[in-house]
Amino acid sequence: MNHESVLDKPRTPEEKEAAARRDAPPAAPPALPNDTPAITGHVALFGERDSAELRQRWSDVQAGFVDEPRRSVEHADALVADVLKRLTDSFTNEAAALERQWDRGDSVTTEDLRITLQRYRSFFDRLLTI
């Protein structure tokens, strides 16, 4: 039995419109000044192994919906909470690492600060594209 079709098929006009918006390609990032290197592609939020494990957990949640809908939704809630915690921890660590790059007192050069600001911009853009 294909469990995916039960959950993913839009039925109402509103659901169809939401699905079309969800599936639309992301908007192009704003243009950068000529001296600013562009960030190419999307950086994965999770490694391949973690992504595969999370996708398998989601497949298990979805497959369980037919037999136990409430339990499936409870597991979906727990899975989303786990992913959010992992993301929060990851971004918190990345922000702390950026802070350590410039918070070294007077020994930081303007070039160090320029590179750090570029990394902050990249980090900021990632936060906005989630």
Image (cartoon, grey):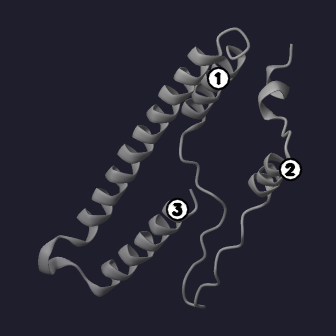
Secondary structure of the residue carrying numbered label 3 = helix
Which residue has dot 3 on it?
126
Residue 103, quarter of picture: bottom left
Residue on which disc 1 sits: 56
The CA distance from mark 2 to mark 3 is: 32 Å
Mark drawn on residue 88: none
State which quarter of the image contains the C terminus: bottom right
Secondary structure under the numbered disc 2 in the rendered image: helix
Spatial separation of the CA atoms under disc 1 and disc 3 = 25 Å
Q: Earlier in the sequence, mark 2 or mark 3?
A: 2
Residue closer to the observer: 21 or 121: 21
Q: Is residue 119 left or right of residue 24?
A: left
Residue that label 2 marks? 13
Kindly identify the amino acid type of the residue bearing the numbered disc 2: Pro
N-terminal label among 2 and 1? 2
Q: Amino acid at mark 3?
A: Arg
Disc count in the image? 3
Say which of 93 and 34 sits in front: 93
- Relative to 18, say whether 41 is above or below: below
Q: Position of residue 13 (x, y in %)?
A: 86, 50
Vertical arrangement, residue 13 with respect to residue 78, above or below:
below
Where residue 107 appears, x then y in whole percent?
A: 16, 78
Tell me residue 115's x, y (percent). Answer: 40, 77
Q: Separation of disc 2 and disc 1 at Cα?
A: 30 Å
Q: Are marks 2 and 3 in contact (CB under 8 Å)?
A: no
Q: Earlier in the sequence, mark 1 or mark 3?
A: 1
